[in-house]
Image: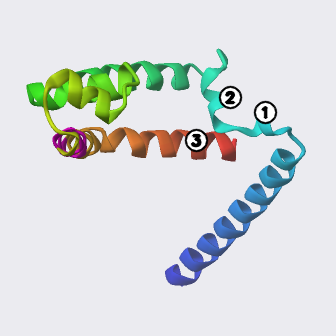
């Protein structure tokens, strides 16, 4: 008897979620491309969770960059924040382009590991917004 109720609740929940998703898809399809973009939700003042997540992510990125080894940190900053090309960085730091690539690869791998939880949070937040 209990398993019947569990299965019944599960099926009704799935049906409800499918209906809700369909309704959201229809309502999102009537929006323009700019209105439907998830980043537009993050920029609105009516979503303080998005603002908080954005601030926290910026702080986490800064902290993770600070924890990189000194040369990798310098290469990463020049590439991502100063928008320099690998050849420019190599010339400026008196290293080869392959060394710059190696530093970037290791920096990005380290940052990906350090910031993985924020990717999950961002995914959950955007999923929440789409289901709202």
**Looking at this view, is 68 or 88 the one in front?**
88
Task: Mark 1: give few (<14), some (14-19) or many (20+) Cα within 10 Å.
Answer: few
Residue that carries the numbered disc 3 in the rendered image: 126
How far, Cα to Cα, is label 3 from label 1?
A: 14 Å
How far, Cα to Cα, is label 1 from label 2?
A: 6 Å
Magenta residues, start to end: 99-106
Q: Decide whether the magenta segment is chiefly helix, strand or loop.
A: helix
Whether residue 64 is visible: no
Q: Are marks 3 and 1 in contact (CB under 8 Å)?
A: no
Task: Point out which mark residue 40 bears.
Answer: 2
Point 65% across, 75% down: residue: 11
Mark 3 or 2: the one toward you = 2
Whether residue 73 is visible: yes
How far, Cα to Cα, is label 3 from label 2?
A: 11 Å
**Looking at this view, is 90 or 29 the one in front?**
90
Q: Quadrant of residue 90?
A: top left
Nearest to N terminus: mark 1 or mark 2: 1
Nearest to N terminus: mark 3 or mark 2: 2
Left-right relation of 123 to 70: right
Residue 16 screen position, x and y as percent: 72, 62
Helix, strand or loop status at disc 2: helix
**Looking at this view, is 24 or 8 the one in front?**
24
Residue 69 screen position, x and y as percent: 9, 30
Name the quadrant of the C terminus: top right
**65 falls in the magenta region:** no
Q: Quadrant of residue 75?
A: top left
Mark 3 or 1: the one toward you = 1
Q: Are marks 1 and 2 in contact (CB under 8 Å)?
A: yes
Residue that carries the numbered disc 1 in the rendered image: 35
* Most distant residue in the top direction: 45
């Amino acid at each position: 008897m209990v398993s019947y109720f569990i299965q019944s609740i599960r099926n009704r929940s799935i049906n409800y979620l499918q209906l809700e998703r369909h309704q959201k898809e229809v309502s999102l399809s009537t929006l323009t491309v700019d209105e439907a973009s998830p980043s537009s939700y993050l920029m609105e003042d009516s979503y303080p969770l998005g603002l908080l997540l954005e601030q926290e992510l910026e702080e986490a990125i800064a902290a993770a960059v600070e924890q990189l080894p000194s040369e990798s940190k310098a290469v990463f900053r020049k590439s991502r924040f100063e928008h320099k090309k690998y050849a420019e960085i190599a010339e400026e730091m008196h290293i080869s382009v392959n060394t710059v690539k190696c530093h970037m690869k290791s920096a990005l791998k380290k940052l990906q590991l350090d910031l993985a939880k924020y990717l999950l949070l961002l995914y959950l937040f955007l999923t929440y917004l789409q289901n709202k």
